[in-house]
Image (spheres, coloured by chain):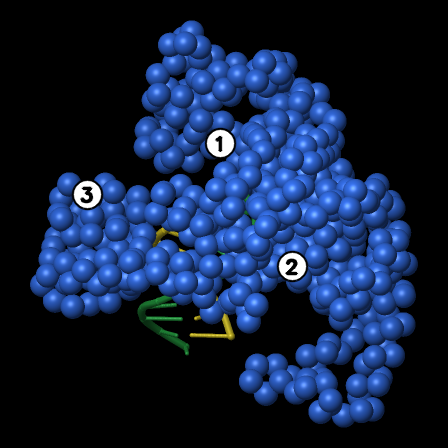
Chain colours: A blue, B yellow, C green
Amino acid sequence: YDIKSDLYYLFEDVNFKNYEDLTIAEYLIDPSRSKYEIDKSAKIYLNRNLHSLEDLVGKGKKTLSLSDVDKEKLGSYISMYLSLTEDLREKLLSYIDERDMKELYYDIELPLVKVLASMEREGIYVNKDYLIELGEEFQKELDELEKEIYSYAGYEFNINSTKQLGEVLFEKLNLPVIKKTKTGYSTNAEVLHKLKGSHEIIEAILRYRTLKKLTTTYIDGFITLISEEGKIHSLFNQNITATGRISSQDPNLQNIPIKTEEGRKIRKAFIPPENYSFVGGDYSQVELRVLAHLSGDEVMIEAFKEDADIHTKTASEVFHVDFEDVTPLQRSNAKAVNFGIVYGISDYGLSQDLDISRKEAKEYIDNYLDTYKEIKTYMADIVETGKKQGYVETIMHRRRYIPELESKNRNIRGFGERVALNTPIQGSAADIIKIAMVEIYQELQEKQLRGKLILQVHDELIIQVEDGDIDEVKELLSNVMSHAVELDLPLKVDINSGKTWYDAK
DNA sequence: GCGATCACGT
DNA sequence: ACGTGATCGCA
């Protein structure tokens, strides 16, 4: 039960075939549960009412150490735990078998436990001095912005408080209210951008928000997590997301900035040991490729086979212009539609994204579905399947139940429909990269390459490798990732390397 | 401790 | 669509 933490200590001795993890089995049976605790599972799967460990040690500040727990109570808890585990195992494995999840469980998720444990244990070196320096740079500008904002407002207030900021903008300065939230005025980036022309304070606030985020989350936040050896060991969770993706925490290494150059600089702080480099591989358009495969849409499959720029190709089809004549705006609109389709689009959502009317958004979508006719069929079919079965599946039979499809509330049902479409796409992409991770891990060991997998960012893998083995690892990573599964179209992988995470782009 | 808001990623 | 985390302000 939750064996990843134990693998830290048993690492050298445990081999692939001789461990099991019931939290993983439970996750595959129902990935939407918020946590996997043995007392709850005993109730769900065996209808047994049990005391939890928490009943023994308490919670919060007064939590007891195990050594302080009454020995008799502890003993009976442990014996209950052991016999329960065996009963639970039998029950869960029968579910896994019934649902055709044996391959997913034994060949992907279980081996992956060890891969993730290895990534957590290895961690990643951080250049602390660089981070501190970058932080000081940001802080200097933040101090100036703070003064500037106070002078525009006419008084000092807490800029971080949306409530106080709303009062300044919409009551003191009388700027037009663009949007309201449940609790008051909306002050998010989207709103602020629309207010940009109306007062100089707006640009200062936007800049303040950006720099504040970078300092608090990515600089101060990281510095406190650096170990004595100068590393960060974040956790890679295997039973959190409803779609099968991995999540990362303490710190989250899956949302390090990249879009703006300033934020991207954070990545220069992540470095390999001496004489090592990073080799990175990322799937190009993996979710759209998965959609092309799942729907069997020949137009989209053909576009990918030609290795065309998919957004330009989409624009040329949707707007009925030659490939060469697609304008940057047309391409960026087509890109938004492609994104929207993967997320299970609504005309409302797309109209928000593109800041156009709902009617225009609907026209874009209709044009899109006229172009990719089999995607239209697929969208209708998958929702139908979800309603009929109560769940949808990925290519490796990962399953997600969608009770929202039965809701009488239109909004909730609409959400369920988007989930029904997005889950097989996002989840199959997760299946694919997980297969690649398990294979890479095994190949690096068997070929005795001096490389270790250290990061996964949904469609991207980063390996830390001794300089002499860079070329071989690049080749291996490219092959393993692109052949992880066989679809009706090729998977494309881009490979890079460098001396910091920033450079492995 | 917790919901709400905001911002970062794929 | 899927996440994590910082902060505020209230309980």
Q: Is residue A400 left or right of residue A416?
A: right
> In this rendering, do the residues under marks 2 and 1 share a single chain?
yes
Q: Give A179 or A334, whichever is nearer the viewer.
A: A334
Mark before the other along the chain sequence, 3 or 2? 2
Q: Quadrant of the N terminus of chain A?
A: bottom right
Q: Position of residue C9 (x, y in %)?
A: 31, 71
| Residue A270 as seen in the image, left or right of residue A275 | left
Mark 1, chain letter?
A
Residue A401 percent coordinates (x, y):
68, 46
Marking on residue A196: 3
Which quarter of the figure has residue A156? Answer: bottom left
| Gap between marks 2 and 1 measured at Cα | 34 Å
Around disc 2, counting alpha carbons within 10 Å, would you say few (fewer than 14), some (14 to 19), or many (20 or more)? some
Viewer-nearest residue: A122 or A218 = A122
Q: Does mark 3 fall on the same chain as mark 1?
A: yes
The residue at the far top in this view is A322
Q: Is residue A505 above or below residue A68?
A: above
Q: Of the residues shown, which amino acid type is indicated by label 2? A: Glu
The three-letter code of the residue at mark 3 reads: Lys
Instruction: Report the side of A306 relative to A357 (left or right).
Output: right
Q: Residues within 10 Å of mark 3 (few under 14, many from 20)?
A: some
State the image coordinates of residue A378 (x, y, percent, origin top left).
63, 24
Q: Chain of mark 2?
A: A
Name the residue carrying label 1. Answer: A339
Rendered image quadrant of residue A488: top right
Look at mark 2 in the image and give the residue it sits on. A122
Q: CA distance from mark 3 to mark 2?
A: 46 Å
In the picture, residue A486 is in which quadrant?
top right
Amino acid type, residue under disc 1 in the picture: Phe
Along the viewing direction, whichever of A282 and A231 lies nearer the viewer: A231
